[in-house]
Amino acid sequence: MDGILMINKPKGLTSRDVVNKVSKILNTKKIGHTGTLDPIATGVLVLCIGKATKLVDVITGTDKEYVASVKLGELTDTLDTEGKTLEQRKCFINKDELVNVLDSFIGKYDQEVPIYSAVKVNGKKLYEYARRNEKVNLPKRKVEIKKIELLESSNDSYSFKVTVSKGTYIRSLIKDINDKLGVIGVMSDLLRTRQGKFKIDDAYTLENILDNKYKILSINDVLKDENCVTIDDNLFNIIKHGGIINNVYKDDYVTFMYNNSVIAIYKKYDKDNTKMKPYKMFV
């Protein structure tokens, strides 16, 4: 059993919970997910099974699209409604100002990682510092907000749709938006509607999996449109042994097919982009 399975994660479960449940149903231990969703969040969770686990970091690196809801007037330690309340006060927003602030986040910026996350500092996960009330300097990461659109707003709440790069924390983005507005608020709901090419309309519920009403996408299905090149016998003999090849394609990544099957993904090898080396092998 090798391939990709798209799950519509329910609220209340961790991503690892979902992996464990699907692993038990499908009777396989070789399974991994491609991007953590908090228990409060729902939506697209892409699972890689068998040989397709080689694609975990490939898919993890793709853009993600979310619909986020924000409740104003409260701040918690987790930056969502699940956490311990740190502050409460009445807050009001102006719709035009909100739209302008949202637009101002389009592009790249240094985002502070939330304390309740699994990012490690000095070998220890940040949430471990939080649970022990230990002080720690929160790291920052360069993230990119590619699209952002206001969906609804009221006196005490708003929601928006956003497309972001790998590593973006929506809870942190919401805090940064609220800071710029001069208000406090928390994430009250989060729906991941897309990850790369994988959309929520094509995702299955856990009930679907239990009822055997699902389809696993093959590695070919997933990669056949990803800058794919069909190769001859000579190049196949080089690639199957992991040989370095000339980058006549002038691309960062190329997927190679032989006899209608994906056999490898190669990536650029040097700064001048003249050579390519193996990135993921399927032979």
Image: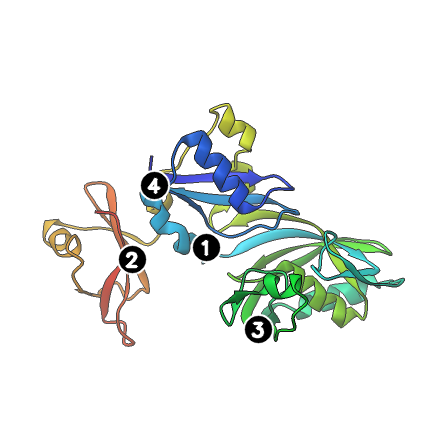
Whether tag 1 and tag 3 are in contact, CB under 8 A, the answer is no
Give the residue drawn at x 55%, y 28%: 207
User: Which residue is the extreme one toward the top?
Assistant: 211
**Pick the front one: 209 or 260:** 209
- Nearest to the eye among marks 1 and 3: give it: 3
Amino acid type of the residue that numbered disc 4 sits on in the rendered structure:
Gly
Secondary-structure class at tag 3 = loop
Number of residues whose C-alpha sits closer than 10 Å to that of mark 3, classed few (under 14), some (14–19) or many (20 or more): some
Q: Mark 1 to mark 3: distance in Å?
A: 20 Å
Q: Bin the neighbour count of mark 1 within 10 Å (Cα to Cα): few under 14, some 14-19, many 20 and up.
A: some
> What is the distance, in whole Å, between disc 1 and disc 4 at their CAs?
17 Å
Label 3 belongs to which residue?
Answer: 139
Mark 4 residue element: helix
Mark 4 Cα within 10 Å, few/some/many (few <14, many 20+)?
Answer: some
* Amino acid beneath label 1: Thr
Real-space Cα separation, disc 1 to disc 2, in angstroms: 17 Å
Mark 2: few, some, or many residues within 10 Å (few <14, many ≥20)?
many
Closer to the chain start, of discs 1 and 4, is 4
Q: Earlier in the sequence, mark 4 or mark 2?
A: 4
Q: How is the image coloured?
A: rainbow
Q: Would residue 279 be visible to someone looking at this image?
A: yes
| Residue nearest the viewer, comparing 178 with 99 | 178
Q: Give residue 46's position: percent from left, percent from top.
A: 47, 45
**Could you give the CA–CA distance between mark 4 and mark 2, rounded to whole angstroms?**
22 Å
